[in-house]
Image: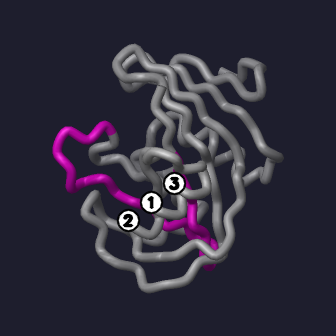
Amino acid sequence: MINTTLCYLEQNGSYLMLHRIKKENDINRDKWIGIGGKFEDKESPEDCVSREVLEETGLTLDSLSYRGIVTFVSDKYETEWMHLFTSKHFHGTLKECDEGKLEWVKIENVRKLPLWEGDHIFLQLLQRDLPFFSLKLCYQGDALQEAILNGEKIR
């Protein structure tokens, strides 16, 4: 089981998105995602997301909201628990990212980008401002086969 974090930084009606185009053999190659990465030893979800945001963007989180846990199940990859966050409060100077291109994208345009199918579901949940949720996304290859929200099948 892999533990990761993902954070959507919000400013002026836009999310900071990362277009993953720089790393070879990247599971997210050519996709647009939020900011995050894998846990290091002894890190909490908040520790991990704060470190990843700083490393990838140069920005320091002043506060964040823990929005949910997304469980990714795949026939190709190890099961992953992704701890999902949002933040409207951060400071610093945006830097170049070695994993791809950072870009502020209007929230209403984010779902038009090349995303994983399941990302559309949790992005919609974030916009509906649901309380903390658990979302299970089951993939076969790159195709989403099933989605379960708080124990109830939604796809």
| Label pair 3/1, CB-CB below 8 angstroms | yes
Q: Position of residue 63 (x, y in %)?
A: 68, 70
Which residue was labeled with disc 1? 52
In the image, what residue occupies the spot 72% across and 18% down?
153
Disc with the residue nearer the chain's start (3 vs 2) = 3
In the image, what residue occupies the spot 37% across and 68% down?
102
Image quadrant of residue 94? bottom left
Q: In the rendered structure, which amino acid carries the disc numbered 1? A: Glu
Quick check: 143 above or below 66?
above
Which residue was labeled with disc 3? 48
How crowded is the residue under tag 3: few (<14 C-alpha within 10 Å), some, or many (20+)? many
| Label pair 3/2, CB-CB below 8 angstroms | no
How crowded is the residue under tag 2: few (<14 C-alpha within 10 Å), some, or many (20+)? many
What label sits on residue 56 in the rendered view? 2
The answer to whether 5 appears left or right of 85 in the picture is left
In the image, what residue occupies the spot 55% across and 83% down?
91
Q: Which residues are magenta?
A: 5-27
Q: Position of residue 64 (x, y in %)?
A: 67, 64
In what element is the residue under mark 2?
Answer: helix
Quick check: 125 above or below 148?
below
Question: Which residue is at the front of the view, 2 or 10?
Answer: 2
Q: Residue furthest right?
A: 131
Q: Position of residue 8 (x, y in %)?
A: 57, 60
Discs 3/2, front: 3
In the image, what residue occupies the spot 49% across and 42% down?
4
